[in-house]
Image (tube, rainbow, N blue to C red):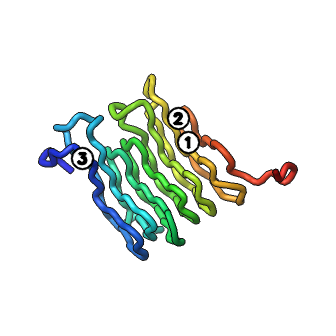
Amino acid sequence: IDNNYRNTDPIHRVTMWDVDGVQFKKCNFINNNTNLPDAQQNFYGIYSIDAGYKVGSNSAADACTFQKLSCGIKATRAAGNHTISVQRSNFTGNTVGIITQNVNTAKIVNNTFTLHNPARGNLGFGLIVYTGTGYNIQKNTFIGNNVANKTEIGIWVNNTGPDNNRIYNNTFTKLDYANLALGDNRNDPLNPD
């Protein structure tokens, strides 16, 4: 996206509905538009509903880049069992790096999230997980910018239920909140109700 894009309507570089097996390697999703005010730039790298895909791989040579977007990846699930895997990719200056909503068994591993574009609002997130279960979030690096009057959150998990899920071995630097959990995100064997 560059200065030739003059529309203020939301734009998603890639959209997918009910597909499976798509792979993204060495892809760059970068917003270089300087003509529109930041508040009007509602650009997503990948937006999906009920889709199964992989971004990056175990190899650093396959890394994808998401930069200066409203959201790097937004994956939602209404039905079906498709999931996403995001590995060894870079998220820089986005309002939100990745959002998963009701996506089960998402794999978010070995990524770097450098938060956020301060001009785009008061909040910056590396990863947001709404509902969904069975996720594997590990070996990611979340780096904040320590900007005054801005809140930067590495991982925000919201109502993922009682299953055993794993957020493990991540690195958090210069953030207001490293890992924030809201709602029901665990099973309490001493109080099952």
Q: Earlier in the sequence, mark 3 or mark 1?
A: 3
Q: Is residue 8 above or below residue 138?
A: above
- Contact check, label 1 and label 2, Cβ < 8 Å: yes
Measured Cα–Cα span from mark 2 to mark 3: 31 Å
Measured Cα–Cα span from mark 1 to mark 2: 7 Å
Q: Does residue 59 appear in the picture of this structure?
A: no
Residue to which mark 1 is pinned: 172
Q: Position of residue 3 (x, y in %)?
A: 14, 44
What label sits on residue 9 in the rendered view?
Answer: 3
Determine whether the residue tagged by mark 1 lies in a helix, strand or loop. Answer: strand
Q: Does residue 73 appear in the picture of this structure?
A: yes
Determine whether the residue tagged by mark 2 lies in a helix, strand or loop. Answer: loop
The quarter of the picture where residue 51 lies is bottom left
Between marks 2 and 3 in the image, the one whose residue lies nearer the viewer? 3
Q: Is residue 13 found left or right of 19 in the rendered image?
A: left
Q: Earlier in the sequence, mark 2 or mark 3?
A: 3
Instruction: Tell me the amino acid under the disc marked 1.
Output: Phe
Q: Position of residue 105 (x, y in %)?
A: 58, 65
Q: Is residue 139 above or below residue 70?
A: below
Instruction: Tell me the amino acid under the disc marked 2.
Output: Leu
Q: Position of residue 158 (x, y in %)?
A: 60, 47
